[in-house]
Image (cartoon, grey):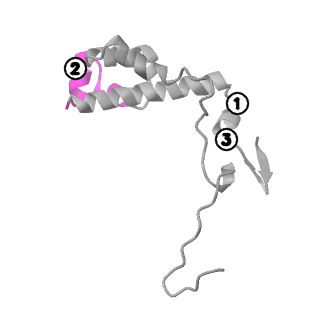
Amino acid sequence: MAREEGDWTIGSLEEFLDLSEAEVRFIDLKIALGDAVREVRKAKRMSQTKLAARLETSQAQVARMERGRTSVDGMLQALIALGETGQEIGAVLARFDDATKPTRRRKGPAAGGRRKKRRPQTGEKKRA
């Protein structure tokens, strides 16, 4: 829920972009697939350029893929090209099976989070 603070309205990214829960979950899924492409590529000690050649695309496209900025089918094709099985790809998708999964939220006082205790500086007295 957004709240007013002076001239600013404080709220979540979802509220700002007016995203539904389904849209937020889809974005999270794309990010997870991109993370999986990066993790598998690095585990196989393959460069983005080499993966791009295997996919017949550019290194820049692979970089976008790893950030979740391309189509889901492109990321699935990359995982298959990296040798991932259907079961391994399914494990990535299964993370989103839980309907109660909380969405990404900004942390900190402005988002309703807790503020960290301040450490006293050298020579400064501790507060009671």
Q: CA distance from mark 2 to mark 3?
A: 39 Å
Q: Residue 104 appears at what percent x and percent y?
A: 58, 37
Q: Looking at the rendering, in which quadrant would you find the C terminus?
A: bottom right
At mark 1, the secondary structure is: loop
Q: Residue at horizontal 79%, vertical 57%?
A: 6
The residue that mark 2 highlights is 53
The residue that mark 1 highlights is 18
Q: Residue 63 appears at what percent x and percent y?
A: 35, 31
Q: Residue at horizontal 65%, vertical 52%?
A: 113
Q: CA distance from mark 1 to mark 3?
A: 10 Å
Indicate whether residue 61 is drawn in magenta. Answer: yes
The secondary structure that dominates the magenta segment is helix
Mark 3 nearby-residue class (10 Å; few <14, some 14–19, many ≥20): some
Q: Quadrant of residue 18?
A: top right
At mark 3, the secondary structure is: loop
- Circle number at residue 12: 3
Residues in magenta?
45-64
Indicate whether residue 71 is drawn in magenta. Answer: no
Is residue 56 in view from this perspective?
A: no
Which comes before the other along the chain, label 1 or label 3?
Answer: 3
Q: Amino acid at mark 1?
A: Asp
Q: Residue 1 appears at what percent x and percent y?
A: 76, 40
Mark 1 nearby-residue class (10 Å; few <14, some 14–19, many ≥20): few
At mark 2, the secondary structure is: helix
Q: Amino acid at mark 3?
A: Ser
Where is 87 relative to 124, above or below?
above
